[in-house]
Image (cartoon, rainbow, N blue to C red):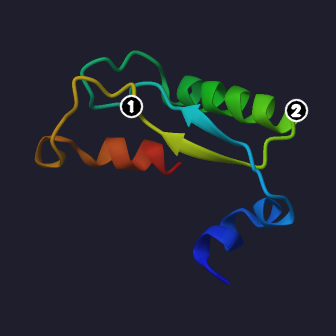
């Protein structure tokens, strides 16, 4: 079984699947960061619950709000820590 099938087993049961995107707000250590870690988690969970309510098959988490983008050599461990919390 491939990795996608393991992560999204419901997707194999039909020809089409709907996967939602959780848009994590700007993370600590990035220029537009304004929220506490708990507020970031709460907002991401709100989106996840909405996708669950409407029976989405899976979700993907992204941090598109970290603009302007910071090169990895310029970002600290707090960005990775919060994204994986």
Picture quarter with the N terminus: bottom right
2, 77: nearer the viewer: 2
Q: Which mark is residue 27?
A: 1
* Residue underneath mark 2: 53
Q: Name which residue lies at 58% across and 46% down.
A: 60
x and y, in percent, of residue 48 in the image: 72, 36
Q: Quadrant of residue 9?
A: bottom right
User: Picture coordinates of residue 66 (x, y %)?
Assistant: 33, 28
Q: Nearer the viewer, residue 18 or 67?
A: 18
Q: Residues within 10 Å of mark 1 (few under 14, many from 20)?
A: many
Left or right for 73, reference 3: left
Left or right position of 55 against 44: right
Judge from the rendering whether residue 67 lies leftward or rightward of residue 48; answer left or right: left
Furthest-front residue in this view: 15
Residue under the image location 23 percent in, 44 percent down: 76
Considering depth in this image, is 51 or 14 the residue closer to the camera? Answer: 14
Mark 1 or mark 2: whose residue is earlier in sequence: 1
Total marks shown come to: 2
Identify the residue at image location x=42%, y=35%. 63
In this rendering, position of residue 1 left or right of residue 84 = right
State the separation of the CA atoms marked 1 and 2: 26 Å
The image shows residue 43, relative to residue 48, as above or below, that is above
Q: Name the residue furthest left.
A: 73
Q: What is the x, y in percent for residue 39? A: 57, 23
**How many other residues sit within 10 Å of disc 2, few (<14), some (14-19) or many (≥20)?**
few
Q: Secondary structure at mark 1?
A: loop
Q: Residue at x 35, y 31 (%)?
A: 28
Location of residue 23 in the rendering, given as x and y in whole percent from the top left corner: 53, 30
């Amino acid at each position: 079984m491939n990795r996608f099938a393991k992560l999204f087993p419901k997707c194999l049961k039909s020809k089409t699947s709907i996967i939602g995107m959780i848009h994590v707000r700007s993370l600590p250590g990035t220029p537009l960061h304004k929220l506490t870690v708990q507020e970031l988690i709460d907002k991401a969970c709100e989106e996840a619950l909405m996708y669950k309510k409407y029976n989405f098959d899976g979700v993907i988490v992204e941090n598109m709000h970290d603009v302007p983008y910071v090169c990895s050599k310029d970002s600290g461990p707090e960005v990775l820590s919060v994204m994986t919390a």
